[in-house]
Amino acid sequence: MEQYVIKGGQPLVGEVEIGGAKNAALAILAAAIMTDDTVVVENIPDVNDINVLLDAIGGIGASVKRIDRHTVQINAKSIRNFNVEYDYIKKIRASYYLLGALLGKYNHAEVALPGGCNIGSRPIDQHLKGFRRLGAEIEIEHGKVIAEAENFKGSHIYFDVVTVGATINVMMAATMAEGLTILENVAKEPHVVDVANFLNSMGANIRGAGTDVIKIRGVKRLHGTQYSVIPDQIEAGTFMYAAAATKGDITVLNVIPKHLEATIAKLLDIGCEVEEFDDAVRVISKGNLKNTQVKTLPYPGFPTDMQPQMGVILSLCNGTSTITESIFENRFKYLAELERMGAKVKVDGNSATIQGVEKLSGARINALDLRAGAALCVAGLTAEGYTIVDDIVYIQRGYENFEEKLRSLGAAIQKVSSEKEIQKFKLKVG
Ligand code: UD1
């Protein structure tokens, strides 16, 4: 089992290149099967979640070719199988995007029901409601969603909750439904817009992505395209917050600063300096950071995927801060790990009170989930002594070359898989 060993205390300084957005890429690769023509997708991050989805796409018969590390070519002409197995779904929930893509193109899909991730119950009722409103018959049998749509027709759908997954999934399916579909109370995240732009580049007719209402006029067929995925705002935010926490100075390159507004606003609140450029953002922290209040909200609010990274910073700010988590009900587990590193926290339902401490101290901790894992590594980078992070497989799901990028900024971090390697690291860094 691989782990990270980290020696904390070093400010992170330098520039780091940000990759393509994992969550946009997952939906775009699924949508790429909606044409018989060849689709080339660029700026795909080389992370485990993407590789599992590509296996799932290959598994239903499409041809999947990696042209280089970040470019994938997909041709779905050879798809004969509309059944996505639990093996893929249990590894990544996002393979449920194949439900919308298969239904839209072939009017039939069988996809295993996704299990939960570690951050709370994650139902798919809004996805299913949307498909039903478009005319699909849906049954749940033997742990599978079996969806059939003889007459896929445009419809007016109002989502009961703002959900990224359901917005994208239903938008994909409606792309090839007959007539006009109007989706209301939709998610406005940059990756929703990116998927809409991708589908439009294949000949879809989608308007309004990025606002509360998306209108889709169905088309008979989609065609091939070449498309480049937007930069990953969460990867960028994670490095920006690593600068804040370690009293460092980091410039994230290849980003869209507009997508980072809520992330930047909180850095300014606590007293960091932030410089914005056309496609880069520089964060400078001189320490002595102030407390603040944070509430996670759908975009353009503060992203839930940045909440653990924020929690780590707040554990080192002066005074008492609060976090309210309003998207997922179980996203504070990492605070128990942080407590083991000396943080002072109190969790009450969906809010947490964090009283800043002078320093964290290194400990053996568990990554728990993707973003919590990255946040706890940042905690380790600020801490006195050594931190060992277990279960880094979660981090590898969504961060490409995480430790290499941190090392290039001056971090003492290494991937290890034995006690002997940990001892060797300790001898090396002193
Ligand atoms: C996506 C992101 C995830 C991010 C989340 C919120 C991907 C692969 N993952 O997850 O990283 O944390 O958006 O920005 O893109 N809900 C329902 N019924 C549904 C669907 C969702 O009640 O049918 C609820 C969820 O329980 C949650 C809220 O809606 O409370 C938002 O979930 P959603 O935006 O759908 O998250 P995901 O798409 O799963």
Image (cartoon, rainbow, N blue to C red):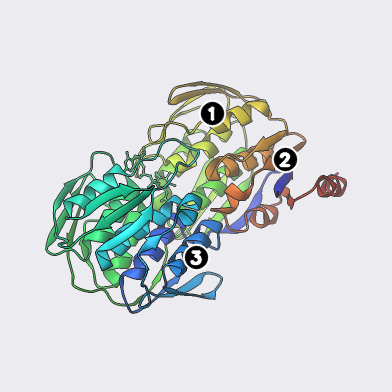
User: Mark 1: few, some, or many residues within 10 Å (few <14, many ≥20)?
Assistant: many
The picture quadrant where one finds residue 400 is: bottom right
Q: In the displayed structure, would residue 346 be above or below residue 10?
A: above
Q: Position of residue 300 (x, y in %)?
A: 34, 44
Q: Nearer the viewer, mark 1 or mark 2?
A: 2
| Viewer-side residue, 349 vs 236 | 349
Q: Which residue is mark 1?
A: 290
The picture quadrant where one finds residue 202 is: bottom left
Residue at image position (67%, 25%) is: 342
Residue at image position (59%, 44%) is: 374
At mark 2, the secondary structure is strand
Q: Is residue 350 visible?
A: yes
At mark 1, the secondary structure is loop
Q: Which residue is mark 3?
A: 55
- Under mark 3, the amino acid is Asp
The furthest residue to the front: 142
At mark 3, the secondary structure is helix
Please give the label number shown on residue 388. Answer: 2
> Along the horizontal axis of the image, is 244 left or right of 217?
right
